[in-house]
Image (tube, rainbow, N blue to C red):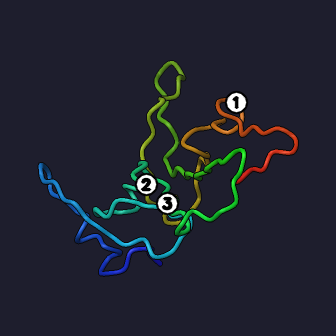
Amino acid sequence: CHAFTGPGGGAAVTTAEEGETKVGRFKLLYPGLYVYHCAAAPVPVHIANGMYGLMYVQPEGNDLPPVDKEYYVMQSEFYHEPPEVDDDGRRSEIVEFSYPNGLREEPQVVAFNGSESALTRDHPLKAHVGDDVRI
C-alpha cells in the first residue's frame, strides 16, 4: 500500500535521469506518519542502502494537542554478508548487501534513527516528569 496514488505509487512522476531535475506536487489527503523511498530499480537494494526517510503529515489546522517534547523514531534494517577478514584476522568495516538475507527478511542489524545507540547513548529521548510527549 502506498500513500501516493497512481502507477507505482507515483514513481513515474518522481523518477529523474542523471542530470535531470523533476518537480512533483501532491495533495496530502491523510494526516499520519509515512515512509518515503526511492522508486529506482531495484527498490529493495536502494532501501537497504538508506534511500528512504520519514514524512510527518500534520492534521489540517494542526489541531493536535500541544506537547512539551516531540520525537520521531525510524527503524532501519541492514541485510549484509559477513564481513571479509584479512590475513591478520581483522574484519573489514565494509560489508556487501545480501539478496538472500533481504528476501528472507533476516536483518543482521536493526537500528533506530540511522545508527546503533542513536536513541540511547548518542541522542536519548529525554523528558521531565509531567511533560506531555509525542513519539
For the residue pair 61 and 26, the one nearer the viewer reads as 61
Number of the front mark, 3 or 1:
1
**Residue at mark 3 to residue at mark 2: CA–CA distance:** 16 Å
**Residue at mark 3 to residue at mark 1: CA–CA distance:** 28 Å
Locate residue 21, reporting x and y percent: 16, 54
Category of crowding for the residue at label 2, using alpha-carbon neighbours closer than 10 angstroms: few (below 14), some (14–19), many (at least 20): some
Secondary element under disc 2, as helix, strand or loop, is strand
Q: Earlier in the sequence, mark 2 or mark 1?
A: 2
* Residue position marked by numbered label 3 in the rendering: 102
Locate residue 12, reporting x and y percent: 23, 71
Q: Which residue lies furthest to the bottom in this view?
A: 6
**Residue at mark 2 to residue at mark 1: CA–CA distance:** 24 Å
Locate residue 18, reporting x and y percent: 14, 51
The answer to whether the residue labelled 3 contacts the one labelled 2, judged by CB atoms less than 8 Å apart, is no
Q: Which of marks 3 and 1 is nearer the N terminus?
A: 3
Numbered badge on residue 66: none
Q: Is residue 36 left or right of residue 132?
A: left
Image point 60% across, 46% down: which residue? Answer: 109
Secondary element under disc 1, as helix, strand or loop, is helix
**Circle 2: residue type:** Tyr
Secondary element under disc 3, as helix, strand or loop, is helix
Number of the front mark, 3 or 2:
2
* Residue position marked by numbered label 1 in the rendering: 121
**Circle 1: residue type:** Arg
**Circle 3: residue type:** Gly
Q: In which quarter of the image is residue 116?
A: top right
Numbered badge on residue 52: 2
Locate residue 124, reporting x and y percent: 71, 35
For the residue pair 98 and 66, the one nearer the viewer reads as 66
Image point 41% across, 61% down: which residue? Answer: 44
